[in-house]
Image: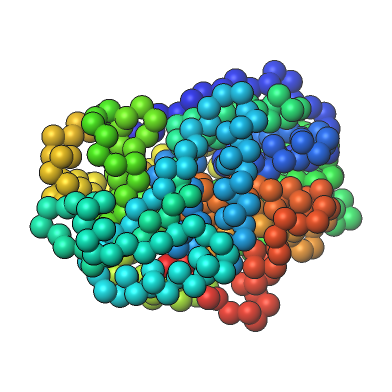
Amino acid sequence: MAPPLKRIPSDPELPRQADVVVIGGGIIGVSAAFSLVERGLSVALVEKGIVGGEQSSRSWGWCRQQNRDERELPLSGVSMRLWDKFAAEIDEDVGFRRCGLFYVTDKPAQLAEWEQWQRLAREYDVNSRMLTAAEAQERVPAQGRQWLGGVYSVDDGKGDPSIAVPTIAEGARKRGLTIHQQCAARGLDIADGAVTGVVTEKGTIRTQAVLNAGGAWASMFCRRYGLPFPQASVRQAVVHTRPMANLGEAVYTPECTVTRRLDGSYTLAVSGRATVDVTPQGLRYARVFLPMFFKRLKAIEFGIGASMFRGPEALARWRNDQVSPFERTRVLDPAPSRRTIAAILKAVTGQFPAFAGLEIADTWGAYVDCTPDSVPVVSAVDGTRGLYLAAGGSGHGFGLGPGLGQLAADLVAGDTPCVDPRPFRLTRFYDGTGVRVGGI
């Protein structure tokens, strides 16, 4: 079942031209569009389905600096400031709250990783502190568990995935953005190695700058033009409860996470457990993903499903005057794994008896678009002037999305980047740098 999501209208007319066309209405694309229109540029956002309809509305909603890979830390600081900016400057509530995040564990190796990460916290001025065993037990009491310790990330928080992206998009519209839903980008017009337009199902928009922020579909779009972007869609699942008593705002344990939403309901999930479907695209990029799969083998299941034949990783050919795969799947809505849902419910109710009487409102699946090193890509695309890529959130793109959008907008506009863009360049997978799997 699809998650709850605020719906917004589309603009009635597709512009004949724009300074920039953004493909994809997720958190990255919408944030980039917001930043670009603030600079006085004319921007059109085209979305094959509905704004926020895929991964951006299916996430936990955590917005954090804690436990990020060092390559992402500068950008995570930018993102947190932008979440504050959206909350302050957009007339409607975007659902962002700095509530603090609690992590607890009874695993010595995990606690040691968190303790080691505190060096980065000090270096990047992240307001984070370790919890003693007694503090962890007091903050997150759990049945039958004795926590060895934990982390409290004081200034981190959460956004509400059901309203955040559509509300930011509406804020951008008030600043000049035009929004076009049910309007798939089928392809590009290219002349002399440079972009001259975007061909959509509703017509062509003339432009010299295109940002591909297509989430799990980004690699398929690039592939038409011989542009390799290694991307794997990892299937995850979420349980959504009905509103209930406040049992904590945002908590992580090794077996589950619980996140309270604005309406008092909870998002329940498990970190690191996912299914990777065998697909043509997956086989194409298998070698570059091997380091990640070996590192996380215990948390990954492999399967064969419908995505072998349709969806963002299937084989597909089409012309700009033909119905594209993007139109055949308006909203990517995979069925949640029953096995994962059962594991989430067992973990949550086993550790927290107060959840034993929870009422399930719905469950849903999502495809998380991952890169081989778990670090997103924000980059100009070599060989095609005017084409830029911002995708590969790798399961933590919601909170980082505003910063990723800001960096993408900087590159598109030719302005000084908000952070060093080199860690996010697409060519790192091919220039001999080597894949260093990120995150803890």
Return the residue nearer the eye: 303 or 25. 25
Taking the spot 51% from the left edge, 23% from the top edge, the residue there is 7
Question: Residue 417: horizontal and vertical position, in percent?
Answer: 76, 57
Q: Quadrant of residue 363?
A: top left
Q: How many marks?
A: 0
Question: Residue 303: horizontal and vertical position, in percent?
Answer: 32, 59
Taking the spot 70% from the left edge, 38% from the top edge, the residue there is 33
Return the residue nearer the eye: 131 or 438. 131
Q: Quadrant of the C terminus?
A: bottom left
Instruction: Note whether 120 is above or below 23 in the view shown.
Output: below
Taking the spot 69% from the left edge, 26% from the top edge, the residue there is 173
Instruction: Note whether 307 is above or below 330 in the view shown.
Output: below
Which color scheme did the rendering employ for the protein? rainbow
Q: Is residue 309 left or right of residue 342?
A: right
Q: Quadrant of the N terminus?
A: top left
Taking the spot 30% from the left edge, 37% from the top edge, the residue there is 266
Return the residue nearer the eye: 387 or 278. 387
Question: Residue 343: horizontal and vertical position, in percent?
Answer: 20, 52
Please identify the residue farthest to the right as the structure is shown.
192
The answer to whether any part of residue 205 appears in the image is yes
The answer to whether any part of residue 233 appears in the image is no
Question: Residue 154: horizontal and vertical position, in percent?
Answer: 44, 52
Please identify the residue farthest to the top as the structure is shown.
12
